[in-house]
Image (cartoon, coloured by chain):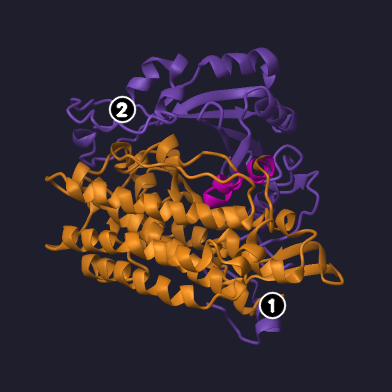
Amino acid sequence: MADEPKEPKPPQVPTGEKPASSTPAVSTPPAKPADASAPAAPPKPAAPVPPKPPVVLQTPLDNELVKRFRATLGAALFEAIEDRKQAILTVERARLVEIARYLRDEEKFDMLSDLTAVDWPKREKRFDVVLDLYSFAKNERLRLKVHAADAEEVPSVVSVWPAANWQEREVFDMFGIVFFGHPELKRILLPDEWQGYPLRKDYDILQQDTAWVRENLGIESGQ
Amino acid sequence: MGPQHPSTHGVLRVKLKLDGERVISSECIIGYLHRGVEKIAENRTYQQFAPYVDRMDYVAAVSSGLGYCEAVEKLLVVEAPPRARVIRTILTELQRIASHLLWLGTHALDIGALTPLFYCFREREEILKIFEKYCGARLTTHAFRIGGLQYEAYDTFEKDVERFCKDFESRIVEYEDLLTQNRIWIGRTKGVGILTAADAIAFGVTGPVLRASGVKWDIRKAAPYAAYDQYKFEIPVGTTGDTYDRYLVRMEEMRQSRLICLQAIENIPAGPIMAKVGKVLKPPPGEVYHAIEAPKGEIGYYVVSDGTVMPYRVHIRPPSFINLQAFDRMVRGHLVADVVAIIGTIDIVLGEVDR
């Protein structure tokens, strides 16, 4: 995975990023000391750590949370990894709402802090829909991912976290991913009649809906 | 209402369904300032994109810049040197004060108190002067670089900050004299736009708006970045989550920011201001979500690298956009005149809502 560019990165790596991976069971929580203001941040004073040559940034994750998740929802979990101390779970698209409910109610991830998508056009299922969750109780973040092919619908999590409403609309607006069960799925940033989905990789940066621009702005190009 | 209404702080358009003077429901129509920042990011190198983030929340550019630089640093697995982190903290806290001052001035203006605006801009000007002396720009500063800072603090930097902080203590009292006990102010803000803690969390609301609802949560404490773990400060919280509480929370935050600045200038560590990052940044493949406490709430950057010089994807989680979602909940049942107060109290910047 690590394609090791020849930047002189390792020398100045005081972050102590990777030790966490050797103790996966507690790997996510220690990143965030809850309310201890003064000395608690481990990354900072760790400056004299000797440079560690092999930088493996993505490691399999198997902490308590993942174990509980497996026990409850078993097959819905495709992959659990840790990337730069962040827990990332790839889960089954069809069961997303069930998973979201479980994480909110049982694991106390009460806030959906971010929802977005990434387009990988060469992959069989080109879209990643990415949800960043936060738990106030545990002071912990968790990232959920589902894969979706071009015409596949993703279940909407608005019923679980109302915060998803505008964010799913934005993803629909920019990627054309349809969220099944969304109360009012329509464009949010672009005009309603706009054709095309700008954040797809096959949408060029200079591309625009020329017909819309001509009709509504009375000019040839908005560029 | 809007998009050219003076109280909408830019180009927010709100469709209101009214029963006489009462608001039944509302719908925000946004996107007038959409520039496709996230698309631009995919076509620029990591460094080239940095100035663009200043243009989202253009009244708190330093904070947006800090979030982006730290996100890319996390992706590169480097960390800025201690000196750079302390200077970053000072500038970011000054920016928080400047942003809150702009908010206070315009919010009071919306509600009908004209005077605070002039007072607030007087102090904000001093902060902008410090920015200008530091990096040459006042608003879209591009103050930080990935890996640290480009500019060393200028000779009288500490003195300037100290003088500002000393003066500022009595200045906050002046604002409070004008507003805190003012009967009109209380009448227009108390009980207006109440947001409960449960609603605030459900809508993903962060920043002063969340804290005014009684949730004691601040990323500076929950996941300290820059040099925040070294300083003592309090997180002010409200009780009822109304417009008046949000006002009090922001006033107290300015005091706390001032204290952080004073602690920080006492001891700025010596040493380099730039970590060793190459001229060409090629972060190892992977992804990072990094959030910091901007003046308006949690600003998060989700950056995906495919190992090339340009980000594969940059997603920005703007606090204004998410907080504005709760507007409908806050405005229902209130009078049209209160809508103006509620738009003001969320403290949105449309450049950030629309990106």
Q: Quadrant of residue A221?
A: bottom right
Note whether residue B315 is visible: no
| Chain drawn in purple | A
* First to last magenta residue range: B198-213
Q: Which residue corresponds to mark 2?
A: A42
| Chain drawn in orange | B
Q: Classify mark 1: residues with Cα within 10 Å, few (<14), some (14-19) or many (20+).
A: some
Q: Which residue corresponds to mark 1?
A: A211
Same chain for labels 1 and 2? Say yes or no: yes
Residue kind at label 2, given as amino acid type = Pro
Please tell me which residue is depicted at 65% across the width and 72% down the height of the picture. Answer: A209
Could you say where residue B24 lies in the image, as x and y percent from the top left?
84, 62
Q: Nearer the viewer, mark 1 or mark 2?
A: 2
Q: Nearer the viewer, residue B99 or B263?
A: B263
Tell me the subunit letter for badge 2.
A
Tell me the subunit letter for badge 1.
A
Please tell me which residue is depicted at 59% across the width and 76% down the height of the picture. Answer: B112
